[in-house]
Amino acid sequence: MLNSLRTQVGIIGAGPAGLVLSHLLYLHGIDSVVVENRSRQYVEERVRAGVLEQGTADLLVEMGVGERMKREGLLHSGIELRFGGRGHRIDFQDLTGGKGITIYAQHEVLKDLNNARAATGGQVYFEVEDVSVHDIDRPRPKVRYRKDGNSHELDCDFIAGCDGFHGICRPSIPSAVLTEYERVYPFGWLGILAEAPPSSHELIYTYHDRGFALLSMRTPRISRLYLQCKPDEDIAQWSDQKIWQELQLRLAADGWKLTEGLVLQKGVTGMRSFVVEPMQYGRLFLAGDSAHIVPPTGAKGLNLAVADVQILARSLKRFYDTGRRDLLDSYSEVCLRRVWKVQRFSWWMTSMLHRFPDENSFDQRRQLAELDYVTGSRAAATTLAENYVGLPME
Ligand code: APR
Ligand code: PHB
């Protein structure tokens, strides 16, 4: 039997894009249904990024889902760039007129959003199967899926493709309509979560002969650390002891000590830059990782996903309030202007801080000069700072 359900906006994926969109629409008085193929527990436990731009944190507060973040999140007003064994602070607060970032894990944001959706009667269906979209270029597009063995059809005005890079929405658009832009990097990040108090109050991005390293954190007791590695690095070859040894070498600086601890989790991620244009086809709107991927240097993935859905939510609000389609029609163009600036920033941070297999001594000298410039010139430091805390929304 086919169960039919009616909603204004069908949302595929309960990651940051899907859940922020669903709650923003609720606050605008617009009905939505979210379908997600993983379990709620999986989504709420998966370790991902942890840096919120000023605007992302402000938005969560405005949406009424920022209480726990305000209590438990760590406010940072700068980062350190470390090279040649010395640290150099980039002071965001000073350079951006008081802005900063909040360290608060993505899965904690998702827990808060799920709780807010549940408390306000939000319809979020987890563990659905065989999700597909239909009639996306017609006035009443449909989402079909199976749950607990039953088939369902969601009759919508619009569909939001918030289903990440491997989702089904982007491939549902005729390929002739889309142009893809991509760069795959010849390295990855080996990341650990460790039961160790962070050895620095703020994040440390390190350029080192042996490769990039990053010290980040989740809480006052939990550190998150990364090492540049081969893109296909076999994690089985990396004992906890070897990881700590390598982190000690790359992060070393005079008078500074890296505190070690129990490794709670470890993994390797590849790095790519990817954009698809346009981000809309008919009544299907792509948002977040389904439309673009950034390399993690600069921590932009989640923030960019949130920016997309803010633009989408206000475009849908205009449509339902006034019948005007102008903002919906310009959705892709407006998003892509920000997307490409964030792509540029993430690529630039990545290029400045990593060792490349095909580089020569000229490239290394140029990277060091770039770091010297960024940490020595107020103008250059300001460009890093204003991008890191988040460019203003259009
Ligand atoms: N049907 C339903 N849900 C799906 C499907 C599908 N066919 N395919 C994927 N999903 C779900 C995934 O299980 C995931 O929960 O869509 C969600 C997409 O979430 P994210 O991958 O987190 O993407 P997004 O919401 O765009 O957020 C981007 O999150 O994890 C980070 O690196 C990412 O920081 C970036 C940000
Ligand atoms: C993280 O804490 O996971 C993190 C921080 C900064 C980055 C990337 C990841 O640039």
Image (cartoon, rainbow, N blue to C red):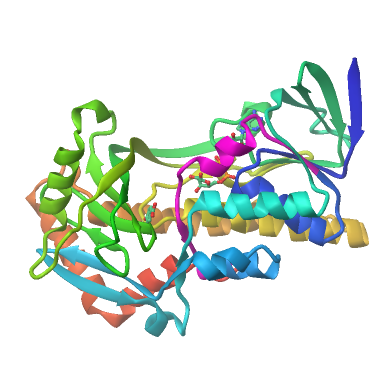
Residue at figure coordinates x 70%, y 65% from the top left: 63
Residue at figure coordinates x 39%, y 72% from the top left: 385
Residue 219: x %, y % from top left = 40, 60
Q: Is residue 36 magenta?
A: yes
Q: Is residue 43 left or right of residue 233?
A: right
Check the picture and name the quadrant holding the N terminus: top right
Residue 216: x %, y % from top left = 33, 58
Residue at figure coordinates x 78%, y 38% from the top left: 282
Q: Is residue 101 left or right of residue 214?
A: right
- Which of the two residues, 328 or 103, is positioned nearer the viewer here? 103
Check the picture and name the quadrant holding the C terminus: bottom right
Whether residue 202 is situated above or below residue 227 in the rendered picture: below
Residue 15: x %, y % from top left = 60, 44
Whether residue 355 is situated above or below residue 5 in the rendered picture: below
Residue 110 shows up from this direction: yes
Residue 115: x %, y % from top left = 69, 52
Figure quadrant, ligand 1:
top right
Residue at figure coordinates x 24%, y 63% from the top left: 199
**Segment tinted magenta in the rendering:** 33-55
Q: Is residue 263 magenta?
A: no
Q: Quadrant of residue 43?
A: top right
Q: Is residue 149 left or right of residue 42?
A: right
- Which of the two residues, 217 or 58, is positioned nearer the viewer here? 217
Residue 234 shows up from this direction: no
